[in-house]
Every structure is written in C-alpha cells, then in structure tokens.
Amino acid sequence: MSDLDKKTKVHASYITKEYDLIQKKSDKLKSLFGTRKEEIPQFWALKGVSFDVFAGEAVGLIGINGSGKSTLSNIIGGIIPPTSGELVISGETSIVTIGAGLKNPLSGIENIRLKCTMSGMSNKEINENIEEIINFADLGDFIYQPVKSYSSGMKSRLGFSIAVHQNPDILIIDEALSVGDDTFYQKCVDKILDFKKEGKTIFFVSHSLGQVAKLCDKTIWMHYGDLKAFGPTNEVIVEYKKFTKWFKSLSKEEKKEYQKRYKSEQSSFSLENLYDKEVAKRQESTLLLRSERKDLQSKLQRNQVGDNMKNSTKIILVCLIFLTLLFSVISFSGKSLTFFLENPIVFIQKHITKSKKDPAENKVKSSTQKTISESTTESTRNSTTKSSEMIQSSSNKVKTYTVLPGDTWSQIAYSNNISVEELLEANERLETDSLHSGEVINIPETFNQSGEN
C-alpha cells in the first residue's frame, strides 16, 4: 500500500520550539510579560520541522544529544506546545518515558489508577484492565510500594505497561526501553509489533540503532533542531553512521568548533529568516502564488499558547495585583469595603496621600520652630511650655459614651459642647457614618482658659 492510500496520523509543518535561557528568577517574570526580547537570550530546539506519518508506521527518532528528539516527541505527545507551525494529530496519543507522569509519593497501583483516570478511562475500564497492567509490569510486591523507591528500570516497566494498556492510536516511546532487562525488553518488542499489526502508529526515540532498525519502518534524523533526513530506516541509519564516523575522526578542538557553530545557529535563528529561506527555495522551482505565501506566513506565526501572555491576560494580572494591594490597605486601615466604596476620595486622602508628605517640609518646620524658641526669653518659654502642658494634658482626656437608639453624631456633639469634627477625630472616623445602638464611642473633654472642663 502506497503512502497515498494510507491515512495520515501525524502531519507536521514547519514546527519550531523556542526556549528562554533563564538565568535568574526575575527573567521568568520578564519573559511572561514579553520584555525578554532584548534582555533574555533564546534557544531554538526545533527550527521548522515538517513530515507526515501514516497509520501502521513505526518511526524512529535518532540524533546526537541536544538534537531535538525529545522536544519533538513531547510536542507530538501534547506535553508541550510548539512555538509555531501546524501540527495535526489524528487519534489519541500516549507517551512513555522513564518515570513520566509518575507521582513518587504514591504506590505503583495508585499511579496506575491516577494515570488511567487522567487519560479518560472510567473506573469500570480501570478495574477491567488493572490486573493485566500489573501482570505486564511484573513488579511483584513493589506494586504496593511508593514509586520513589523504584529503580529507573522499574519506573520504565510501570510507565510502559500503563501506556500500552490505554490502547492509544499513537504510542511514543522515548528511551523507555534503554533501562529495562532483556526479558522485559522482548515483552515490549512483542507488544509494539502487535500494535503495528493493529494499524497503530509508533514513534521510537532511541540511541540504539539496533533497536531502531528492528522496530521501525522509517526514521527521522534530527540534527541541532533541523530534520536532517527522513526516509526508510536502513537508508537513514547508513547516512547517520557515516556522520558519526566522520565526527569521531575530528580532533577535540574541531568537535568543539563544530558544536559551537551549530548551537550558535540555534540561538540566532528567527521565524523571519525561515520564511525568507522557504520563499527563496520554492521560487527556484516554481512561481510562488500569493495564497501560498499567505499560508506559509500563517504557519510561521507564533502560537499564542505557550508563548508570552496575551495583552488581556496581562491586564487581568495587573488588575488582580492592584485589587490585592487595595484590599490589604483597607484591611489594615480598620475600615470596611463598604466605607471605601462610599467614600473613596476621602479614604485616599487620609490613608494614601498622607504617606507622600515631603519629609523636607517637616524638617524645615522643625528648624523654624527651633529658631523661634531660641530667640524668646526664658520667661516666655516657661509660660509657653506650661500652657502647652496644660492643653496637652486636657486634650488627652476622653470619656466614653454608650450610643442610645436614635442618637446621631450631631446630637452627641451638641450635648457635649464640642464640634462634630472633634468627635469624629476622637473616634478615628472620616465621615458621619451610621451609629449602632449599644456602640461605645469616645467623647473628648473640652478645656477653657479658666482651666475648667
């Protein structure tokens, strides 16, 4: 059956993935708000990867460390979003990596239930399959122990067993078979071959060329974010072996220079350059139509998901921060939210603007008062001090009053021969808000020049 007769399971077109090289915690906040372009360096793990994979195919993913294999498999598995490009997945995916998604504090059997529930299986389906999952993993009594006590091989067993029994349309295996023993490896191979017979699609990420040659029909060779080659496994592996042989023949300095050059290209890569490159490539063979340019531009637009926050999200976040600070100020002021809503201007004037008074103004006033004090006579100073002490003593005197039904601020002030403003100040009130029967308030005692209250 030709590729044209097969159903496309994975269509990838110009898939890119950009990472921020975060060096400190503040850089993460800058990247979220989109201020990172000039300050935070970027690294492109994928630089425009395109391919089609059909039903029933097993595709290998090979390449040296840092080539983008795991990034590509995670994007196909839906774990991380691409920065740009078009990705169409036909069917449910399940990814198997060493310990992927396993919660260390939970036991093996608890992890089985958790991961199966997260994949959409009902309790009935889990109960029907749990015994088979346990038997396939073959962990013995360790299935009841916390996963944090498992070896990497045991985690791989459990993860693979859970993934294959979820019956996915597309199975992605990322180095999960590299840590297992020969017995379990053969069991996994048999299961993968059964999947292929059922018409399921498999992506197999591995450094073991022998495993890739045995299991995969086609192979993708990733090289520093680029798709270096994609075709029949035996052909791609031959080319990859030629490269590794050549690379090993280089001196230590030559290897470093080679790696430095390609990593520099990953840092300097941009979507604009990729667009120009693709346009030039297509125009070499045929005239590029306007519709084709528009389609290419849309594929090379940054995806909103996984990129910087949208402007609407930024506005919401700023508003939440402002409201949090506002409620904190209201809470510490001892006032209610209702009071603030009814008297916002008065509240701001008393509790916010007073904190902005110029300290220099107070310093000038203090210096002036000191000069005046020094220029007065001793007798005048004594008289002033005595009078001030009497006023201070009397002004600190207050009495309490229990509010009766029907009392108002004006009535209480009039009865005690004081102003409403003095009464409000003694009770730290801004406005004549309502009084409640039984409420206890302070009444300042007045002082006249004869020294009587």
Image: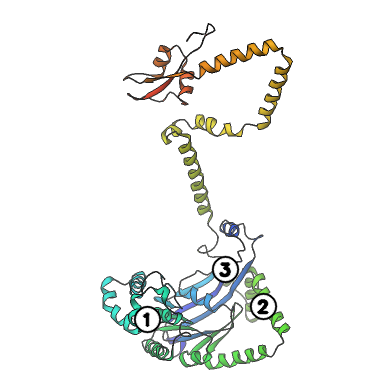
Residue at far top of view: 450
CA–CA distance between discs 1 and 2?
A: 38 Å
For badge 1, the amino acid type reads: Ser
Front residue of 168/22: it is 22
Q: Position of residue 194 (x, y in %)?
A: 37, 89
Task: Decide which of 1, 363 is in the foreground and name it.
Answer: 363
The quarter holding residue 96 reads bottom left
Q: Amino acid at mark 2?
A: Tyr
Which secondary structure, mark 2? Answer: helix
C-alpha span from label 3 to label 2: 30 Å
Mark 2 crowd level (few <14, some 14–19, many ≥20, 10 Å Cα): some
Residue denoted by label 1: 161
Question: In terms of sequence position, does the residue under pointer 1 or pointer 3 come before the other?
Answer: 1
Label 1 or label 2, whichever comes before in sequence order: 1
Indicate which label's residue lies in the foreground, 3 or 2: 2
Classify the position of the N terminus by image quarter.
Answer: bottom left
With 16 as the anchor, is 155 left or right in this view?
left
Q: Residue at x 33, y 24 (%)?
A: 438
Percent of width and height locating residue 161:
37, 81
* Comes first in the chain, label 3 or label 2: 2
Q: Is residue 116 above or below residue 394?
A: below
Q: Label 2 near label 3: C-beta < 8 Å?
A: no
User: Which kind of residue does numbered mark 3 sit on?
Assistant: Lys
Residue that carries the numbered disc 3 in the rendered image: 294
The residue closer to the viewer here, 157 or 116, is 157
State the CA–CA distance, disc 1 to disc 3: 45 Å
Left or right, 94 with reference to 64: left
